[in-house]
Image: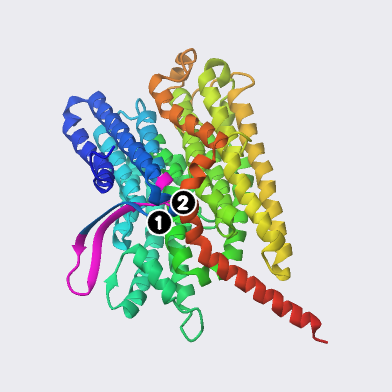
Amino acid sequence: MNGFSPSTHLVLTIAAPLIGAGIAWVLGSRGVAAVRQSAAVTTLVTLGLAGWLVLRYLAEPGTAAGLPYALSEVPWLTEGIFDVRFSLGLDGLSLWMFALAALLSVTAVFVSWDAITDRPVGFYVLLLVLEAAMLGVFAARDVILFYVFFEFTLVPLFFLIGIWGHEERRRAAVKFFLYTLAGSVLTFLGLLAIVLWHASHANVVTFDIEALVDGTTIHPLPMTAAGGWLQMVVFLALLAGFAVKVPIVPLHTWLPLAHVEAPTGGSVDLAGVLLKLGIYGFLRFSMPMLPEATAVAAPWLFGLGVAGIIYGALVALVQTDLKRLVAYSSVSHMGYIVMGLFALTPVATEGVNLQLVNHGLSSAGLFALVGMIYERFHTRNIASLGGIASRAPWLAVFFMLFTFSSIGLPGLNGFVGEFMILLGAFQRAWSGVSPAWQFAYLVMALLAVAGVVLGAWYMLWAVERVLFGTSREPPRGGQDSGQDAADHGHAAATADRCDLRWHEVVALAPLAVFVLWIGLAPGTFLRPAAVAVQRATAAPAAAFTARMQADSTGTAVQASTP
């Protein structure tokens, strides 16, 4: 286990997909089989390295206290007053998302096994480059390095959607790119403002994230009119990029289109990992560096989270396209994560950190299964599907498992995260706000509970229509709800052999294991992250409590004044 240093281990894990991408490119002349086998081996090796690194992290005594692990620093731009470093490391905020990115990359490759026959070299190379970018963004300890990886995730996904997507792939790719790039530019300006503010006090332009957190704690950005409300301005700049990534309603409109048009492998990575970058950004930057602004914005973002829960659920309820239904369910479930994050209670924020992984597993599994159904029947129209369970029992078993995970069935992973988030929301509503806010918080918390009921409704109704009931063959001829309905004879021909194939089992089985593991033993995944999550959210939680107490005092004074 100690054959090489943790820092070398981390760098090798991030570099492995890039090396594999080069190998896949070289093997392109040998045909589709060689390329996809090469990509599969690369993702499995990367997953093995990431899993081994997680075990080393858990065995390290210092990590239990929230200390970073596997730190690696190489001077990058250190001339004059600048101090930019190629700095990597893991802590409780990034550990599980780093591992999830490696796991879902395996799923993305194996669900694409038979689906991608056109230009497979480019597809698998881009998928591996995307994996390296996802791993890098969670390991980056320098603002510039984080931003490079953060932006670099856009490029391969843009091409994956635009080249290998469905009918409206180009419009979806452009909309995805423009939305996320516009928000990211504002985020970079906000991060640059934090760096310059710290430099004005420390006399060195450092981009080290830990140093910036410590510096803004000692010299916080001003939150007064005299200081130009700089902290709030910077918070809004960061919010622009992170809210689009989540996405928070009403900045969500790019997501359903991107999901529907993306190839299945792209949807797996988008839903499982890339949607989590916004929440990770809040935890890593906004909350520890801008606590006062976070406290001011918390009630409104809490409300936007609840709005996303209800809106996403209601829109999902009326969808006729199965993939679009799952896409809007992601909008709804990410609303719980936003609500829990800005509840600013310890139990809710720990639940948020766990729910990032939970949603990644369940949504990736559902998108993978929808892609498998589309490969077999060449339609995603719910009205054109039915009785699949009788012909594909194992596909139905996995679909039911990930559905129950998504709706929060006790004993599965989704229940743990959602329960903690709702518990934290009600704690905040009952005893953590001023009387002026209490009714609004209680109503919002109750609406979030209603969202659980709506989530069960639309998911189970979809399951009933797609998996059970009368067996229906897609209509012949024409187009089916805007989807490519060509070659329906192929659907009939595969009716007797449409259950899961070996590579699809390989794609889904690891996700199913973690769905059960987290549901039955959540402490295994909560403990390593607890200290880091609480440390990141302690300052805004304290600032929010102080504001609520000040509001309560002011209300009491006004009530006692004749």
Q: Quadrant of the C terminus?
A: bottom right
Provide the residue span drawn in magenta.
75-97
The circle drawn on residue 180 is 1
Mark 2 vs mark 1, foreground winner is 1
2 or 1: tag closer to the N-terminus: 1
Is residue 81 located in the magenta-colored stretch of the structure?
yes
* Residue 384 at x, y percent in the picture: 56, 26
* Residue 50 at x, y percent in the picture: 34, 39
* 3D distance between C-alphas at marks 2 and 1: 9 Å
State the residue at coordinates (54%, 36%). Answer: 521
* Residue 178 at x, y percent in the picture: 38, 57
Q: Is residue 13 above or below residue 463?
A: below
* Residue 463 at x, y percent in the picture: 60, 29
Is residue 130 located in the magenta-colored stretch of the structure?
no
The quadrant where residue 65 appears: bottom left
State the residue at coordinates (27%, 33%). Answer: 42
- Please tell me which residue lies in front, 234 or 13: 13
Three-letter amino acid code of the residue under disc 1: Thr
State the residue at coordinates (36%, 29%). Answer: 110
